[in-house]
Amino acid sequence: MKRGYWLNQGYELERIVSGLTFPASIVFDDDGEMYVGEAGFSYGPAVEEARILHIRKNGKICKIASGFEGPLTGFAWHQGYFYVVTGSFNGKVYRVSRTGEKEIIIQGLRGGGDHYTSEIVFGPDGKMYFAVGTTTNSAVVGMDNVLNGWVGLKKKYHDVPARDLKLAGQNFESPNLLDKTNPNARAMTGAFRPFGVSCYPGEVAQGQVMANGVIYRANPDGSGLEIVADGMRNVFGLGFLPDGKLYATSNGFDFRGSRPIEGDWDPFYEVNSGWYGWPDFASGLPVTLPYFKPEGNAQPEFILAEHPPIIEQPLIRFKPHSATQKFDYCRNPLFSTINEIFFAQFGSGPPITTDDLEPKGYRIVKANPYTGQVRDFYINFNPGKGGNWPERPLALRFSPSGESLFIVDFGILEATPGTFIPHSDTGAVWRIKRK
């Protein structure tokens, strides 16, 4: 009988802990102890407790801290404290002691909407880095956002840029399901505006520090918050490589909403100070290219009248809708090639594109960012059913010795047309090591 997964020859897979609910992050402290962050949130009708768990070496699970607003998207260990980032409509960064005392050191982050916050990491400069995603798919609040519920909760919510952006004045018409008195009501919505609010040519969307589609930097006490990079759609994976530079994964545009864009990849960037192109460039390329035209829809046009210079092109463009998330690099030649990067690919959701009939992702890939070569390392052949193998890899972390790779498996999140069906208690942590 064929196994439900494939793993690179010469390695073996072991489940360390199971029964987790929506795990999203893993860290090791200075003593090599393992901790897992449960997000407390999943796409679909599910709300659970967001918390940090200590996975002891004897297998016992102990709760360290809880009461965070979901989703808890990332946490880090730095100089005796946990640093936790959450992505609700009032996103926060917490500093948490070993015994669970919590202190809010940053708040007011523009999470919520379609996307949330990211991993949180510390750089060689001793500062913390984290990201906040965009509120919408492509800067226009549309029926996709009304149907998934958040527009009804936050009628005035919309994307906010990090810098002043001059608008071309393009508006998008859609049904207005918020008008309960008129089933035929229509709405006209402009870029960077609330649902049903138009924009005009030459109008300026005002930049703010509390913005969307940005990567932040701050001191460990939360002071000195500043924007490092902007124009990124949905950064989730962040990390520093041995060259001391910051790198990020981002999730590409979807074919949905009032301004659908087809075929965008998941880009992997070296992060420098500047603009990365969202909402008019997809993985560094203009959305006006015929490649990005969705079948049966109009060719996407620019919604900005002027563009800042694009600071970087991606080092790697991963397959569209593979949902490439958190990553780590190899430090020990006993496991693999030194500095080779391993990426968790969460996998596609409900069909959201004309080319999304077959599942994408559900695997771990390894890559050389300087050559662009990407190879499979682990593949889940039977997603959505659950089994004795990782279902949806979301985060990766090498052990302190570098001899093992730990996988945070989010668990079963079924994807059917138009919705997700999350399954509690199906998450796990797995270990891959050499035979």
Image (cartoon, helix red, strand yellow):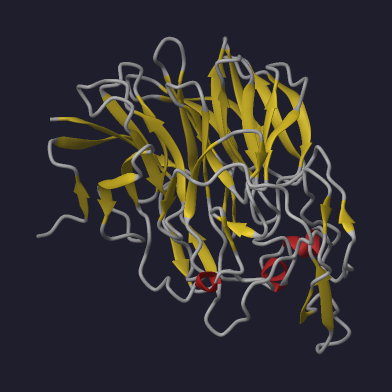
Please identify the quarter of the rendering in which residue 305 is found: bottom right
Q: The C terminus is located in which quarter?
A: top left
Left/right of residue 55 with respect to residue 87 in the rendered view: left
Q: Is residue 320 above or below residue 53?
A: below
Instruction: Please name the residue shown 35% across and 70% down the image.
Output: 358
Instruction: Please name the residue shown 42% across and 10% down the image.
Output: 31
- Judged from this view, the residue extending furthest toward the left is 1
Instruction: Please name the residue shown 80% across and 59% down the image.
Output: 192
Left/right of residue 417 with respect to residue 115 in the rendered view: left
- The answer to whether residue 193 is visible is yes
Please identify the quarter of the rendering in which residue 33 is found: top left
**Residue 262, x across and y down, in percent:** 53, 70
Residue nearer the viewer, 370 or 430? 370
**Residue 86, x across and y down, in percent:** 66, 37
Residue nearer the viewer, 339 or 178? 339
Q: The N terminus is located in which quarter?
A: bottom left
**Residue 236, x across and y down, in percent:** 55, 42
Q: How many marks?
A: 0
